[in-house]
Amino acid sequence: MSPQNIYLSPSIRDWVVLPLLLIMILTGLLRTLTSQLLRSPKPLKDLKLKTFLQRTSRLRSAGGFISRDRFTRKKSYYTQKNTGALQKEGPVLSSFSSEVKPTGGMPNPATAMEGMMGNASFMIQNMIMMNAISHFFSGYILVRVPFQLTEGFKPMFQKGIDLPTLSTSYVSSLSWYFLVMFGLRGVFRLIVGDPSPETLQSYAIQQSLGSGFANAQPFKHEQAFKSECEMLEIAKYRSVIEGSERELLGDMYPKGKRRGKKANRKDDIFGE
Amino acid sequence: MSRIRLNYLRDQKLRRPDEVMSLALPFLQSASLHSEEDLAILEQLCIASLDVSNFEVAESVVTRLESRFEDSSRVMRLRGMVYEAAQNYTAATELYKNLLEKNPSNVFARKRLYAIKKSQNDNPVEALLSYLDENNADVQAWYELSDLYLGLADWQGAAFALEECVLLDPLSAHLHTLLGECYYTLSNSTSEAVLAKNFTVEPLILLARRHFSEALNLKRGDIRALMGLALASKVSATEDIPQPDNSANVSLVDKLKSGQPIVDEQLVGAKLHEFAALELSKNIKDGKLKNSVDAYMKKGAEEIKIAMANKESKKDV
């Protein structure tokens, strides 16, 4: 492709490129600020149930650090038929479920909305911006990138311009919008700044004061309890504690009499 | 400069009330109520002044904060702590209960309510249990529970609380040592022995030995764990270990299946005692203490020797 030299008017720079950049930065700031406002704190209702499940899963993962018999006792406390804390008829669960409102199969529409709010505002804003830009600034090129690009970039760089002979390094307005939109993330971080240590700390304190952000999905405790119960039932005791003395003593550990099958078989074959 | 130091203290969660008082006091009037850092400094100053019982400073900080934040739970918690420091427990309790009503999962208010019950000695165990019911992932709280049980000489309760601690933080040598001590004490007392049947069927002295060993695996040369190991191994080497009944037999079968060799626990006890003696004399720096510990361990080793010889002769008969 022959090098082209198209003169771009300085008023395009002054009245289109720079204002576009400014508009985008301002709307981006607006978006981050509104999303911060929309993020409403909500107390966690399911906290009790969830931490209970954490407790049982701890038994599965770290159970080897307590003795075998204590492990089985704890396990049967959770999984025993009818009386186990994880069983459906168990006293613990019934006391739990009286506090937790049954949500049924339907997710709570309010919580589902909350997750969508952020995305929706983002989408609406984008659609409006794109329409406005293609309406006001279409039909001409805005900038020229200082390097040559292959033909493949044409649809990406020259959206809205149908000139097969135009060099790919010229960028149309809509494409400029996209390029800036994806490239501005770093700039925003510079402007908004990383949260200060105080803000992070106050998040942590807020969490401990009990205003954690609720998950969009409601917590289905019955299912979770059932699966946890099954997992705990098949969990095997893998002792760490019983091997601790052997590990500590190393070579000093007394050698025991091996009474495994292997020794016997050896005897059978070799007759020793 | 002082800002940086205060920030560091906050960040690392260090509790140095004297230092904070001297550094943060100049900020009492000058701190802006609109800068997050200054607010954090005021909070820090308030807690530090309560620590050193300087109630005027605490009061003025809280009043300043209240002038801007009327309804903040973070300021209310400071107000509650000021009440507590002045031993105005009824006002503090009411305030925390209000906080809980507003937000039932307010962990801080629940903790403070427990602290009030404890300082009034008003059935603190129950209060702590109700806290743990909701926040069972709190190691510190379980640790506190074990401490309460120890105060009541309820060794089983303490062992249970420490087991939960170990499950939460299995790589803490200190927790393993404490659990070992609980088991050791349980195995030692005859009145507890009957009750212990409901607690576990495995011989408690072996559990104690294992937990001390695990503590030493995690932290080599820990004197407290070594001393515990010395005591527990001596008992296990000199006394007959009660034969574990049915459900522990299952573990024996498991051991056979896995092909692990069956060892004489008494012999292991003797070896562990030997190991503890070696390590103790290596790790104790104080000469006088070292001599007496060495002498004690030597005496123990002789007792073990006699016990082993007795056992051998019994076997021969």
Image (tube, rainbow, N blue to C red):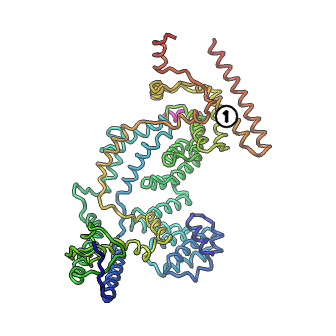
The single residue placed furthest to the bottom in the displayed view is: A11
Q: Is residue B102 above or below residue B285?
A: below
Q: Answer whether residue A176 is visible to the viewer in this image.
A: no
Horizontal side of residue A119 vs B115, given as left or right: left
Q: Residue at x 38, y 55 (%)?
A: A48
Q: Nearer the viewer, residue A87 or A18?
A: A18
Q: Answer whether residue A4 is visible to the viewer in this image.
A: yes
The image quadrant that residue A114 belongs to is bottom left
Amino acid type assigned to the residue bearing label 1 in the image: Phe
Residue B124 is one of the magenta-drawn residues: no
Instruction: Give the percent coordinates (x, y) of residue B313.
Output: 66, 15
Residue B192 is one of the magenta-drawn residues: yes
Instruction: Give the percent coordinates (x, y) of residue B1.
Output: 63, 75
| Disc 1: which residue | B275
Instruction: Give the percent coordinates (x, y) of residue B99.
Output: 43, 68
Q: Nearer the viewer, residue A114 or B100?
A: A114
Q: Which secondary structure, mark 1?
A: helix
In magenta, the rendered stretch is: B190-197
Instruction: Give the percent coordinates (x, y) of residue A248.
Output: 60, 36
